[in-house]
Amino acid sequence: MNVLQSIKSKFIGQNKEQQAAKWLQQNHFEIIAQNYLCKGGEIDLIGFESKQNRLIFFEVKYRKNNHYGDPAETLSTQQQQRIVRCAQRFLQQHPQYQDKAMQFDLLTFLDQQTEPHRIENAFGL
């Protein structure tokens, strides 16, 4: 991948994360953090669903087409482990959420899709 393609890919990824955040807010989620970084990983979005008293860690995946599979298929076991470790770090830093139910969801976009497909409990501890 050349530099231009890399920049374009990063821009598209950021755009899809923004679309996902907007969609979550429209669906009554409070966005607590975006692009939460910890040693060795990142969580795209962290949301709180007050109706269910639930903390949700979201990974956002985008693919231009499905020639090489669905965007959901690109979430590797290693990525899942990094997200779980970051979630644990987040909870250490934000003890007010430690007593909440939590889950890991996947939000996927394919091509020009403007609203994500949500896969609840996509993976776990």
Image (cartoon, grey):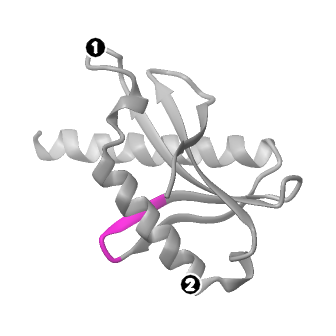
* Percent coordinates x, y for residue 101 in the rendering: 73, 62
Q: Which mark is residue 67?
A: 1
> How many numbered marks are there?
2
Q: Which mark is residue 38?
A: none
Residue at 75% across / 68% down in the picture?
100
* Percent coordinates x, y for residue 17 in the rendering: 52, 47
User: Which one is in front, 58 or 92?
Assistant: 92
The region drawn magenta spans 39-43
Q: Are marks 1 and 2 in contact (CB under 8 Å)?
A: no
Q: Earlier in the sequence, mark 1 or mark 2?
A: 1
In reply to whether residue 41 is colored magenta, the answer given is yes
Residue at 29% across / 41% down in the picture?
8
Q: Amino acid at mark 2?
A: Gln
* Percent coordinates x, y for residue 2 in the rendering: 10, 42
Q: Please name the predominant secondary structure of the magenta segment in the image.
A: strand
Q: Residue furthest front?
A: 125
Q: Is residue 32 above or below residue 119?
A: below
> Is disc 2 placed on a helix, strand or loop?
helix
Q: Residues within 10 Å of mark 2 (few under 14, many from 20)?
A: few
Q: Amino acid at mark 1?
A: His
Residue at the disc numbered 2: 92
